[in-house]
Amino acid sequence: MEKLDAQLLNIIQSEFPVSARPYQSLAKKLEISEDEALDRVRRLAESGIIRRIGPSFDSHKLGHVSILVAAKAPAERLQTVADIVSKFPQVTHNYGRDHEFNLWFTLICRDKDEIVRVLNRITEQAGGIETHTLPSERMFKVKVRFEF
């Protein structure tokens, strides 16, 4: 990885500029052109190094409710079910596990009623998979930052 790409990744992880021209702000920090900053981010995204650029909110402070869901998907349909789950905007992420309940995901909704509605739609679209909900009792938030 080029040194400039590493510097760019270090900045955008926790200091992505909130401005009308964020890539211009990044470019100033890196002493490159705005076009080069944007091109580098695009290239890193196309290569899969950058998966997503977006804000991270404290959903509980915004009044939302979250829940962890463990689902049992047939092994041969795991990817299909994961793709269905991922289409719901209320799902923040999902991941496979080597367990009877092999697909886990987090739902964030406005309230408990919406969680029930969304989970019912997911279950229906995924072919009636079995799910268990695991509400949080305490919040643990770990800030992850990778140094490049």
Image (cartoon, rainbow, N blue to C red):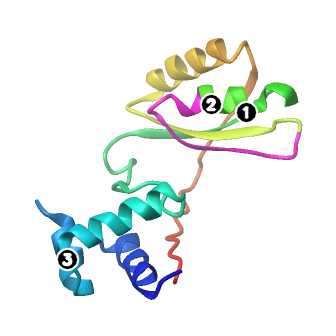
Q: Is residue 138 left or right of residue 113?
A: right
| Residue 53 image label | none
Quote the CA–CA distance across marks 1 and 2.
6 Å
Q: Which residue is painted at 37% across and 32% down in the image?
A: 110
- Amino acid identity at mark 2: Asp
Between 50 and 69, the one lying in front of the other is 50
The magenta segment? 85-99
Q: Are marks 2 and 3 in contact (CB under 8 Å)?
A: no
- Which label lies toward us, 2 or 3? 3
**Up-down: is 4 above or below 69?**
below
Residue drawn at the location 37% of the way across and 65% of the way down? 41
Secondary structure at badge 3 equals loop
Q: Which residue is mark 2?
A: 83
Secondary structure state at the residue bearing disc 2: helix
Estimate the x, y position of residue 116 in percent, counting from the top left.
54, 21
What secondary structure is marked by label 1?
A: helix
Q: Is residue 120 magenta?
A: no
| Mark 1 vs 3: CB contact within 8 A | no
Name the image quarter holding the N terminus: bottom right
Q: Is residue 35 above or below residue 117?
A: below
- According to the picture, the residue beneath numbered tag 1 turns out to be 79
Labels 1, 3: front one:
3
Q: Amino acid at mark 3?
A: Ser
Q: Earlier in the sequence, mark 1 or mark 3?
A: 3
Q: Which residue is mark 3?
A: 33
- Judge by depth and name the residue closer to the eye, 103 or 32: 32
Q: What is the x, y in percent for residue 133? A: 67, 33
Q: Position of residue 120 (x, y in %)?
A: 59, 16
| Label 1 CA crowd tier, 10 Å (few <14, some 14–19, many 20+) | some
Near mark 3 (Cα within 10 A), the count class, few <14, some 14-19 or many ≥20, is some
The reply to whether discs 1 and 2 touch (Cβ–Cβ < 8 Å) is yes
- Given the image, on which type of amino acid does mark 1 rest? Gln
